[in-house]
């Protein structure tokens, strides 16, 4: 342990040089900006910054620090549009809209932004501490998760979700089913056969999450505005209110954040999942654990803190398999892995022994990056909420324009733009019919993951369904899932 | 978007260098299209080529990389055919994976004869990895196990059934007289997850690429039954025998290269062929290429075109034999 502390303090010495601090600040700013714009994610930001990093001939530690700051910044930025505009910037901030947007409507947008910045910080730093304590051991334990265990984990997540749709279960189920259906579009991951692409090459990789979000939320909002002609009033009629949370509110939310940090970290370490599962799980878990008054989903401060904390913790967790085993846990870590390799650093079990200065410098820079991001984000909250002072007729078209150029820059696909418009019409119609749109997004995000893992498990077992319940981990998760679904009803009967 | 412009400006302001001397044609605003999202092989091909062409002074203006994901290059191919048939300033990343998809007719109506093949920048090679405690110790062990009961050897990799990763084991199975369609094969979301499944004991064999198994090999977490290369590979791979050494004539190079639009002018084509030939002959490029996990694969111009056309037709025959294509 003292060896670890010594390595860590050496790591801080690397991360705290003026050059590296300045780089972390720049990276944090770029990351937040890019994360806030729907359409461009941290993946693209990191990829775009790579050539710049080489052009400047930065040493590997500095390059990694700047890239890590961008990576985290994306997580901080993703919440801004989710809370203020109800437009989640990335899959992991879908859950944030549930409580964040109602808070913004009540004039508490600043409060939601501050508490999520604090939550993101706690998630990032908490997960880094867990990583320092036991990275290699955790990474090894995560290997016990195979396809069957992932299926059970996702069923568990779905079981927790049941009832989230609110008052009209049939409409929620229909929306979720439509999302699942959308997730089947594209090249089938098991056989490489095209499904529902109608000969369109641009659909080979499926329907992009960003395109759906921009359509369902931003474009649909514009259509509603046109219809209502109420475009002259601003979104928030109440005064903007205080934006920094009171100590009492922070203490009230702290247990939620700590639990979410743990959940997010554990889920993030698993190479087959990701931040969206972490955010979903922690929100639903918190609702089950602490929501006694039914305020989750109507603007509960804990409901907005949980997914954002878990999101950042999961991003940190995803670094564990990358550093300890050389296995990227997400698209962005895959790009970081590529960056490491270009510096002639082979991630894997030997990295901790061969290049400790890189590993501990990077881990220290996670902490430094999070501190910089918190310091950057809290004062900016006041600026961010000014967005809401804009009248909607100016705001939403601007968001759509921004999002469309983002999608175009990233995918170079005209079809994506038409799809976004089509989803806009769908979202508008859905709102009129009282169909919740969130289950659709979750179906799209989780559908592919769950289908792929079921098929992997069955491919390896030769079609033997029993394999899904064979391991103790999988069986335990299935039992939990059934318990959550049926236990309350059983208890009611018994009474 | 703005981000790309910032990156461009910085690159532009970097030192201006000379370009391929003695050529009449000079590209303006050159562009490399990577037919996948950042982080994959196409992206690597474009960014490595762009960076080194500029650093070595073979290209006066920096080349930008455009990501156009979809169908292992199918979307990029369609874009070139539909909109840029005679653009002299664009090159497109290509790999053995695209050739395999061309052979399966997955590039719409376009074939290997519809582009101008510029050259290879390097190659990776297929390997067959097992966990260090696996009872399988050689290619012969694997083939014997497959012969006894293919269902007892679960395997998996990043590609689908019919992909390059699958082809590696399918060819070995065929050599053992086992119908490749009886293999227990699962496709994962990228080689990293397949490696995790191998280390976790969820699969027994991982037909991956040399570059993606290097770290685990050096750490001793895995063993390689064979490299699917014509000769032994350098570095940590030196002690791993080729399949051919073990009496099995299976090779799977993953060639990474570039093509141009079908109606690109001859002088532009000659320029790019010359630029790639000079690039791949430069020791500084070789060093950077090795860092990216690629090995030498010298082949440009007519030779590369012949190779591409030959490989695609070979694959077509093979797929028909295996029964994946009618």
Image (tube, coloured by chain):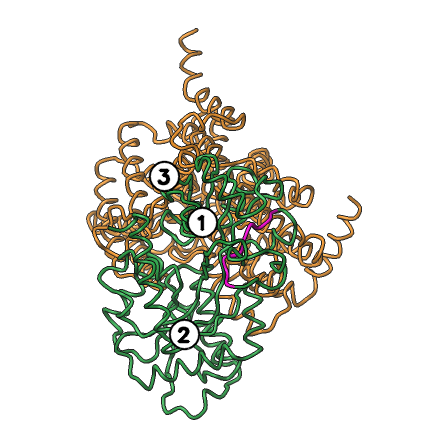
Q: Nearer the viewer, mark 1 or mark 3?
A: 1
Disc 1 chain ID: B
Residue at 35% over, 61% down: B98
Chain that is green in the image: B
Secondary-structure class at tag 3: helix
Query: On screen, A103 above or below A287?
Result: below
Q: Identify the residue position indicated by label 2 in the image.
A: B119
Q: Is residue A402 visible?
A: no
Q: Nearer the viewer, mark 2 or mark 1?
A: 1
A443 or A336: which is nearer to us? A336
Residue B290 % position (x, y) = 57, 67
Residue A366 as seen in the image, left or right of residue B148: right
Quarter where residue A103 is shown: top left
Give percent across and percent down for residue A278.
49, 39
Q: Colour of chain A?
A: orange
**How much space separates mark 1 and mark 3, taking CA atoms?**
34 Å
Which residue is under mark 1? Answer: B172
**Which mark lies nearer to you, 2 or 3?**
2
What residue did someone put label 3 on? A447
Q: Residue at x 60, y 39 (%)?
A: A247
User: In the rendered image, is residue B90 in sight?
Assistant: yes
């Amino acid at each position: 342990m003292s060896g670890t502390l010594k390595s860590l303090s050496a790591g801080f010495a690397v991360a705290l040089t003026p050059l590296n601090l300045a780089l972390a600040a720049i990276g944090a700013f770029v990351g937040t900006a890019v994360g806030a714009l729907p359409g461009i994610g941290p993946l693209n930001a990191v990829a775009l910054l790579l050539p710049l990093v080489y052009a400047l001939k930065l040493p590997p530690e500095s390059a990694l620090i700047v890239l890590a700051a961008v990576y985290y910044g994306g997580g901080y930025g993703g919440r801004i549009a989710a809370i203020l505009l109800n437009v989640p910037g990335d899959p992991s901030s879908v859950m944030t809209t549930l409580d964040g947007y109602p808070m913004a409507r009540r004039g508490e947008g600043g409060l939601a932004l501050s508490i999520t910045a604090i939550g993101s910080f706690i998630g990032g730093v908490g997960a880094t501490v867990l990583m320092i304590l036991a990275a290699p051991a955790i990474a090894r334990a995560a290997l016990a998760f195979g396809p069957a265990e992932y299926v059970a984990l996702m069923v568990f997540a779905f079981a927790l979700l049941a009832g989230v749709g609110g008052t009209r279960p049939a409409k929620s189920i229909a929306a979720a089913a439509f999302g699942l259906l959308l997730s089947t579009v594209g090249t089938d991951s098991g056989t490489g056969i095209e499904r529902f692409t109608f000969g369109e090459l641009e659909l080979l990789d499926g329907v992009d999450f960003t395109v759906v979000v921009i359509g369902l939320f931003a474009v649909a909002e514009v259509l509603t505005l046109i219809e209502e002609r109420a475009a002259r009033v601003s979104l928030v009629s109440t005064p903007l209110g205080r934006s920094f949370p009171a100590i009492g509110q922070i203490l009230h939310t702290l247990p939620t954040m700590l639990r979410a940090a743990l959940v997010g970290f554990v889920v993030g370490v698993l190479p087959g999942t990701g931040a969206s599962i972490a955010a979903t799980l922690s929100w639903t878990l918190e609702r089950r654990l602490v929501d006694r008054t039914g305020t989750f989903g109507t603007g509960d401060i804990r409901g907005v803190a949980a997914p954002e904390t878990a999101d950042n913790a999961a991003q940190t967790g995803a670094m564990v398999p990358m550093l300890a085993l050389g296995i990227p846990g997400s698209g962005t870590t895959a790009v970081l892995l590529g960056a490491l390799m270009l510096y002639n650093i082979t991630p894997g079990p030997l990295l901790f022994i061969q290049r400790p200065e890189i590993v501990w410098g990077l881990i220290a820079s996670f902490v430094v990056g999070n501190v910089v991001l918190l310091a950057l984000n809290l004062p900016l909250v006041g600026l961010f909420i000014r967005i809401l002072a804009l009248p909607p007729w100016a705001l939403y078209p601007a968001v759509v324009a921004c999002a469309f150029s983002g999608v175009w820059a990233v995918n170079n696909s005209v079809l994506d733009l038409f799809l976004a418009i089509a989803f806009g019409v769908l979202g508008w119609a859905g709102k009129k019919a009282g169909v919740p749109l969130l289950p659709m997004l979750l179906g799209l995000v989780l559908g592919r993951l769950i289908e792929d893992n079921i098929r992997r498990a069955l491919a390896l077992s030769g079609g033997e369904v029993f394999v899904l319940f064979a391991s103790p981990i999988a069986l335990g998760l299935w039992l939990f899932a059934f318990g959550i679904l049926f236990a309350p009803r059983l208890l009611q009967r018994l009474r | 978007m703005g981000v790309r412009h910032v990156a461009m400006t910085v690159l532009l302001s970097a030192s201006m260098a000379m370009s391929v001397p003695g050529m009449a044609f000079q590209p303006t605003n050159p562009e490399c299209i990577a037919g996948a999202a950042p982080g994959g092989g196409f992206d690597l091909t474009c960014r490595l080529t762009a960076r080194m062409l500029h650093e070595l002074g073979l290209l006066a203006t920096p080349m930008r990389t455009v990501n156009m994901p979809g169908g292992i290059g199918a979307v990029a191919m369609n874009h070139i055919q539909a909109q840029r048939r005679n653009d002299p300033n664009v090159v497109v990343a290509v790999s053995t994976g695209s050739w395999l998809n061309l052979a399966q007719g997955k590039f719409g109506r376009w074939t290997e004869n519809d582009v101008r093949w510029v050259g290879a920048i390097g190659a990776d090679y297929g390997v067959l990895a097992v966990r260090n405690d696996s009872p399988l110790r050689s290619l012969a062990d694997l083939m014997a196990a497959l012969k006894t009961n293919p269902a007892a050897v679960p395997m998996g990799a990043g590609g689908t059934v019919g992909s390059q990763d699958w082809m590696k084991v399918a060819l070995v199975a065929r050599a053992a007289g086992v119908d490749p369609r009886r293999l227990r094969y699962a496709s994962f979301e990228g080689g990293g997850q397949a490696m995790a499944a191998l280390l976790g004991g969820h699969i027994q064999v991982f037909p991956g690429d040399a570059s993606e198994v290097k770290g685990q090999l050096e750490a001793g977490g895995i063993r390689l039954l064979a490299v699917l290369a014509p000769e032994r590979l350098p570095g940590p791979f030196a002690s791993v025998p080729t399949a051919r050494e073990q009496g099995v004539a299976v090779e799977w190079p993953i060639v990474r290269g570039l093509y141009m639009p079908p109606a690109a002018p001859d002088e532009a084509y000659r320029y790019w062929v010359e630029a790639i030939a000079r690039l791949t002959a430069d020791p500084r490029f070789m060093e950077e290429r090795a860092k990216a996990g690629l090995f030498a694969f010298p082949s440009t111009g007519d030779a590369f075109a012949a190779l591409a056309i030959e490989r695609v037709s070979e694959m077509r025959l093979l797929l028909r034999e295996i029964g994946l294509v009618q």
